[in-house]
Amino acid sequence: MQGNEAVVEGAIRAGMRFYAGYPITPSTEIAELCAEKLPFVGGKFIQMEDEIASMAAIIGASLAGLKAMTATSGPGFSLMQENIGFAAMAEVPCVVVDVQRMGPSTGMPTSPAQGDVMQSRWGTHGDHSIIVLSPSSVKEAYYVTIQAFNLSEKYRTPVVILMDEVIGHLRETVNLDEYGDIEIIERKIPEDIENYLPYKDIENGVAPLIPFGKGVRYHVTGLVHNEKGLPTNDTKIAERLIKRLVDKIEKNKEDIVMYKEKGEKEGDILFISFGSTSRAVEAAEEELKKEGFKVGIFRPITIWPFPDTRLRKIYPKFRKIFVVEMNRGQLYYEVDRVVKREGEVENINKANGEFFTPCEIVEKVKERIKNGF
Amino acid sequence: MQGNEAVVEGAIRAGMRFYAGYPITPSTEIAELCAEKLPFVGGKFIQMEDEIASMAAIIGASLAGLKAMTATSGPGFSLMQENIGFAAMAEVPCVVVDVQRMGPSTGMPTSPAQGDVMQSRWGTHGDHSIIVLSPSSVKEAYYVTIQAFNLSEKYRTPVVILMDEVIGHLRETVNLDEYGDIEIIERKIPEDIENYLPYKDIENGVAPLIPFGKGVRYHVTGLVHNEKGLPTNDTKIAERLIKRLVDKIEKNKEDIVMYKEKGEKEGDILFISFGSTSRAVEAAEEELKKEGFKVGIFRPITIWPFPDTRLRKIYPKFRKIFVVEMNRGQLYYEVDRVVKREGEVENINKANGEFFTPCEIVEKVKERIKNGF
Amino acid sequence: MASRLVEEYFRKETLPNIWCPGCSNGIVTMAIVRAIDNLKIGKDKVVVVSGIGCSSRASGYLDFNTLHTTHGRAIAFATGVKFANPELTVIVITGDGDNAAIGGNHFIHAARRNIDITVVMYNNHIYGMTGGQASPTIPRYDKATTAPYGSIDRDFDICKLAIGAGATYVARGTAYHVQQLVKLIEKGISHKGFSFIKAMSICPTYYGRRNKKGSPADMLKWLKDNSIDINKAAKMKPEELEGKIIIGEFVNIEAPEYTEEYQKMVERLKVSVK
Amino acid sequence: MASRLVEEYFRKETLPNIWCPGCSNGIVTMAIVRAIDNLKIGKDKVVVVSGIGCSSRASGYLDFNTLHTTHGRAIAFATGVKFANPELTVIVITGDGDNAAIGGNHFIHAARRNIDITVVMYNNHIYGMTGGQASPTIPRYDKATTAPYGSIDRDFDICKLAIGAGATYVARGTAYHVQQLVKLIEKGISHKGFSFIKAMSICPTYYGRRNKKGSPADMLKWLKDNSIDINKAAKMKPEELEGKIIIGEFVNIEAPEYTEEYQKMVERLKVSVK
Amino acid sequence: MEKKLVIIEDWCKGCGICVEFCPVRVLEIKDGKVRLIDEDRCIKCGLCEMRCPDFAIYLEVKKDVEGVNAGK
Amino acid sequence: MEKKLVIIEDWCKGCGICVEFCPVRVLEIKDGKVRLIDEDRCIKCGLCEMRCPDFAIYLEVKKDVEGVNAGK
Amino acid sequence: MRSLEIRLGGSGGQGLILAGIILAEAAILDGKVSVQSQSYGPEARGGSSKAEVIISDGPIVYPKVLKPDVLLALTSSAYKSYKEDVKETGLIIVDDSVEVEKESKVKTLKFPILRTAQEVVGKAYVANIVSLGVIAELTKIVSEESLEKAVLKRVPAGTEELNRKALEEGFKLGKVEDKWVEQMI
Amino acid sequence: MRSLEIRLGGSGGQGLILAGIILAEAAILDGKVSVQSQSYGPEARGGSSKAEVIISDGPIVYPKVLKPDVLLALTSSAYKSYKEDVKETGLIIVDDSVEVEKESKVKTLKFPILRTAQEVVGKAYVANIVSLGVIAELTKIVSEESLEKAVLKRVPAGTEELNRKALEEGFKLGKVEDKWVEQMI
Ligand SMILES: Cc1ncc(C[n+]2csc(CCOP(=O)(O)OP(=O)(O)O)c2C)c(N)n1
Ligand SMILES: Cc1ncc(C[n+]2csc(CCOP(=O)(O)OP(=O)(O)O)c2C)c(N)n1
Ligand code: SF4
Ligand code: SF4
Ligand code: SF4
Ligand code: SF4
Ligand code: SF4
Ligand code: SF4
Ligand SMILES: [Mg+2]
Ligand SMILES: [Mg+2]
């Protein structure tokens, strides 16, 4: 199964019944497979006129009651930013897949990269939080997609699946039976719909979302709004709203974050890496182990919110930290922030359209530590 | 003179002769004044169909030889991101003014905020660098605008002026005579146009830009390109190009960064703040001084690249660092990264559409240090 | 207490509305409500989607399922709503800036797809919400804050554009001719497919003041005096129609509707799989 | 060595082009070159702006001032170029996805403004560059990777749209009828104002293969056999024209051109200031 | 069904539209709000209601009469 | 002016368009490239050049003849 | 260094933002430093509107008015919203249509500003200029000449006389009471 | 744990990516683990094309081929680009139209793959399936049955016979030489 295909399978499994999109390499297979499969599961597929419209359409569809997704790559992801911000503000669940390719701009459209890490967090204007997940295998793409829908329903928020071309186009043996009884979070209509407040001020949380057409009429807007969803200029309400939008994610970080650790629990080198790159890092780890280094790997699956609590715990046990990314340094900034030790976070970057080889990583590590730790 | 007006005056002084834009509060006065004034200085004003087109048009105009600008606010800035990335990749000088208002999404359109700090750095996909300047007074808006054009020509890059509603709409006494002999960087056509390479691989630098129609025909693209501007898949060229795009800014940081310092050179509290907020911070500083605190202020005018070298030098002399922003914490991340001391960077935030009062800042500072340093 | 229509179809707590004295947005909004009321479709299955602008604020006042989106994108959101649940009656409220400037692409594509949405565009020639800039429908040489010396753009005939894009119901009404406007909206909603109703509106605050158009009542009178019914216009010479607003139905044709076509495709596939 | 036109107007180092065997992009690109050559406007004052797509890659091969932009935005960039320096001859090369899907809004607004740009749209019914998805101009029921069971969308008549948007020169040609296409492009370039030429093209790789249209030559022959000149078509019945491609000039009218109008405004202001 | 003209003063912005288009001209603006000058001359045509942008003037079906209808 | 048919083998992709539309059918595809079968029968109409998507076949004004023209 | 903070409150359309601008510009003509800012709802119309001016002899650090020395309120809602902020030593000027609190700690003066504009000058929309006259007369923070110049520079061509008249009438109204000023300065 | 890395190189349109997918799927049918990836220029057409398959008994960490055990090259340019990467103990399979280096360190075998497809099977486009037959026969990395199943699952309806024939012919070609396999395993 291909990575892009796993996303579609995972999404359908999670209950996705609406896809709106606009073709772009290397995400296009996701649209194509949705076009093929959705009619058979009672779902809808529509090719929109652009990515702005695609993002708008999935928000509309989600409000009308269907779990909805779109997929794109860098240029399209840039165009979606305004409406991603709308989804964040109006708290409409939806899933956006960004299969990263090399940028900036049109860049090298068929070549892999991980250059949208920071954009996925900060691409839209204004304060907000967002959940971003990044799988490193085809199997994980399937799993992460299901979790993306779950998290998006649970926290009423857009969730970004940050893939890269390598995983998107990779075909790998996958056994879906492993996920036999995976939980799927469905939208529940509360008992008491009389007093329904779509934007109830729940500390660090959200009210359930009742779809349009179910007899509960309310207002949805990108303006600052009160608990009923109606626009307001009340600065107290504004303060609480924005705080809640951020806190419902930041304060539930421990529920949201996923990561994997591998190798030593303490030692010389801690690698931090995600997505396809972590596969090269794992291979490099094997090499370095052979050469006697004590190596650990920390792989965030949840990129945002970043699992900083965990990293804070483990990094002091390593002498040197390497952030390996297919870009010129992005997650690096977050790691460097968390690690309160001068000069001990190092960047291993590659941004030329080629995938990392393990050997490059090994060499760079050795080069950087040739003068000892 | 109003802040937005100062931008227009500065721009015209710097040689801006093309403005394309789309109205949006609180930046609209910039468009309106350009519509009024440009016809009289031989310039062109056009209202485009949206912000995407506005950004595109100024890039086109810049290539055709005119210094060009657009202005917008959050929602429009989000829409411009794709083409800002194009300008970065194709190295086309231009100036984008973002007069920040409260977000996310439509937010509170007439209320101030500083919520686009990270977006201005990371809003477009892929790796790139960008210059972002933020004035804190009307006079400085004038000055910064001229420098924005200068830097954009010098480094062939889009430059963002990150204003906020407070400065945009503030009217202040301004004496332009102060800037009597300010330098204006003009586009020079090199002697040797025979062997002109529009994307010459100059270490940390750029080739001059010859406008279209001057007899030197070349290609401009958002694809990875060689020195002639022609598309290539050569990974070595790609690596060098992306590196140069980043390094021409990062490696020239010391030429680019501007900041102001005020108050003590060492002491209890170091405030870091920018834009209008720093005015509240300065007022708070006066209060705190009265109460016996030793307070310093570090105010970056260049937000990106962030003046980290300087900050690294001065922060160790202060016991506590406060980042004061009209958002829920953005520049904070960069400061927290630079400051390698656990738990000593504190956030003072406000994101409710209201401007900070000095007294709020004083209170928050006291609250945070009530248990002593 | 308020009128039956207000009690039934408005969120009273949100009134009075924020519009300027004499702004016709309220007149057109009430015309939409009258149309819905006449059609007896109830409130629960009606979704009103709007963009950003003075006109687009209408959605907040109305007691339907209401969705106030981003500038220019209302039709794209509405497409998602309608396609996800074709049982809903989806009405888009938009302005001339929202729909004819930034939102043009979604407009022509929805028209092309012939998806069953009714779009009512409040046409006041300017961007009201941002303080009176020129919209694409501003008459040539009229003034606006971004056209201080008179607009040099050719004004956009959005009905012609809608027809060019393939819309199957296209009509123009005015804020003066309320009864007719209600009828046109009713027919637009009943029409299976994409319907577009351009409602000629007035913005006394910006367009009116800057172009010396007098009081709100004067502006409505101008609409009265300068509108010609399409049937009457058919018998007139082009010179006589110069500068006039032709009102009535321009297009009303049957064509395959998008969500139905999708459903048909699904049925076909079911058969072919069996 | 290569032909005089290639030597003179192409960047030979970039050839052979990347297009598939039999792709008509080369034919249409050469038609543009012939038109420019016939008009004797030289190379230095010509700017070719393109979007993103197979067709849009043409700009890289041509030895003019060339600007390969972002997907769908070529016309907006071109507007900046032309308005900044009206002495330049600005030609936009675009695809049906680039122009009719994502770029639709810039297209209609440039037409409305009547800015002096010539747009040549290579219409191959699909998105070639991304591997054969449906474009808005795909004929109903034809297949594409995103329309595996046949497209249910109504196909977009972009010439009709251009007319609806107010374009002052609108024509359709084909990759088979090269001489005529050259003439149409020549007239488009000479025309003062916004010109649109739709060039019916072939994508043997994706559209052709999936819809069993045979070899590149077969596809060109199909264009030959199914095109009818507009003059001839005028005398035919609608039934006879069903499924046919009408080629020739649809609109060729005079109207105020944007950059000239701006200049006139500047002159007016100078006088009024004196 | 008998009708009564009702004015919601709080909502009226005194724009004067209803005044201008009342066929019998029984409305006026006084201190920025509309006022019915002469109830008797009002023909209950509803044109003021139709054009009021603020939903501030309308014809109400009188309660008692309604009661009678309802009783039927 | 005498003309000569030139084929740029490196650029020809063997699509067969020129073959199909040559009015006298003197072209063929051989090993994936176009080939002129019979130079004499070629009427130098230039239709192959006009439709070749790869600019790989064209009529060249013969050098010597050119020389003569130039000498005039 | 002396500095005076002034807030003008009323409803959108009353031209108070323009009044603030004029006041600030008059101060500049007098050789002083001034900042002017405003705020308005999303509508900028119909709703409430607020303009603020700070006039000072030296640089102004904090650009917004925190505790106004002078509040002008043309509507009840502006009065209600802002009266608490005014310094105890300050001055509140209201239109006489506004119901004021009996026991205010702050000196509060009523003037028939709207009525003067409508009935004496003849156009309701010059109430903002009448207000300026009142404020200038009471506070002496700007000179009459500078204020007149500033007004004439900003008002639409053709309305100069009307506005000059409005200003005059404002000055006249303000003359009634000037003790507060003395106590201030 | 045994694992074999295979790279298929040729030009766009030769169907090598499909071949890679089929090979990977055949391995899965055999109960093995496989990954398949590809790369292509921006055009994905005309230009060169590369497919890679790793087949292993256990989990595959690094998903790309670094040093192929087996290289199939249908064009000279593919041969030139990739031959250096092949392991010294590996195997290079080329179409016989490709000019090969005289003194290669790596065992290199030539087969008339393109010709067989065109002339024996009758359709040039089945060269990819012929190739698969050759590879399978030489390496035994997948069983003949699984490969046939995988081929039939992926090829367009109506072309099953043709492809079965192509596979047969591939097997036949591959039979010529099988010593390398023994030495490998
Ligand atoms: C992306 C974006 N650009 C610009 C704006 C600013 N804006 C808000 S409303 C508006 C125009 C409204 O004009 P129109 O649609 O005609 O509505 P009106 O106010 O005239 O009813 C604009 C440009 C915005 N909110 N978002
Ligand atoms: C914003 C954005 N969205 C999507 C793409 C991916 N993309 C590249 S070309 C293309 C379509 C090209 O179709 P068309 O314009 O018809 O050109 P053709 O390739 O058919 O000549 C698309 C969708 C992109 N580059 N940028
Ligand atoms: S600004 Fe114009 S359109 Fe907006 S509410 Fe006021 S009158 Fe209406
Ligand atoms: S994919 Fe189609 S349009 Fe693109 S180059 Fe190939 S044949 Fe031409
Ligand atoms: S109901 Fe008719 S007559 Fe009575 S006030 Fe209204 S418009 Fe006038
Ligand atoms: S139309 Fe309405 S708002 Fe206007 S004056 Fe009459 S009642 Fe008042
Ligand atoms: S020039 Fe004419 S006759 Fe000669 S090969 Fe070409 S098409 Fe055939
Ligand atoms: S048309 Fe051109 S590319 Fe095609 S076969 Fe002929 S010469 Fe070759
Ligand atoms: Mg409008
Ligand atoms: Mg196409």
Image (cartoon, coloured by chain):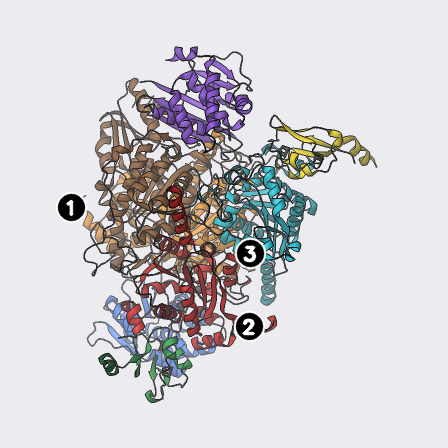
Chain colours: A orange, B brown, C cyan, D red, E yellow, F green, G purple, H blue
- Residue B59 appears at what percent x and percent y? 34, 51
Residue indicated by mark 3 = C160
- SS for dot 3: helix
* Residue contact at pointers 1 and 3, CB within 8 angstroms: no
- Which quarter of the image is occupied by the N terminus of chain G? top left
* Residue contact at pointers 1 and 2, CB within 8 angstroms: no
Numbered disc total:
3
Q: Residue at x 37, y 24 (%)?
A: G146
Q: Nearer the viewer, residue D131 or C267?
A: D131
Q: Residue A371, which numbered label? A: 1
Is residue H38 visible in the rendered image? The answer is no
The amino acid pointed to by label 1 is Asn
- Residues at marks 1 and 3, common chain? no
| Separation (CA) of disc 1 from disc 2 | 82 Å
Quarter of image, ligand 6: top right
Number of the front mark, 1 or 2 = 2
Residue indicated by mark 2 = D233
The relative height of residue G24 versus residue F28 in the rendered view (above or below) is above
Question: Which picture quadrant has residue B121?
Answer: top left
Q: Nearer the viewer, residue A192 or F25?
A: F25
Question: Counting other residues with Cα less than 10 Å from the Cα at mark 2, is it few (<14), some (14-19), or many (20 or more)?
Answer: some
- Residue G43 appears at what percent x and percent y? 51, 35
- SS for dot 2: helix
- The chain letter under disc 2 is D
Number of the front mark, 1 or 3 = 3
- The chain letter under disc 3 is C
Question: Which picture quadrant has residue G156?
Answer: top left
Task: Decide if residue B36 is on the left or right side of residue B214.
Answer: right
- Which quarter of the image is occupied by the C terminus of chain G? top left
| Separation (CA) of disc 1 from disc 3 | 74 Å
| Separation (CA) of disc 2 from disc 3 | 23 Å
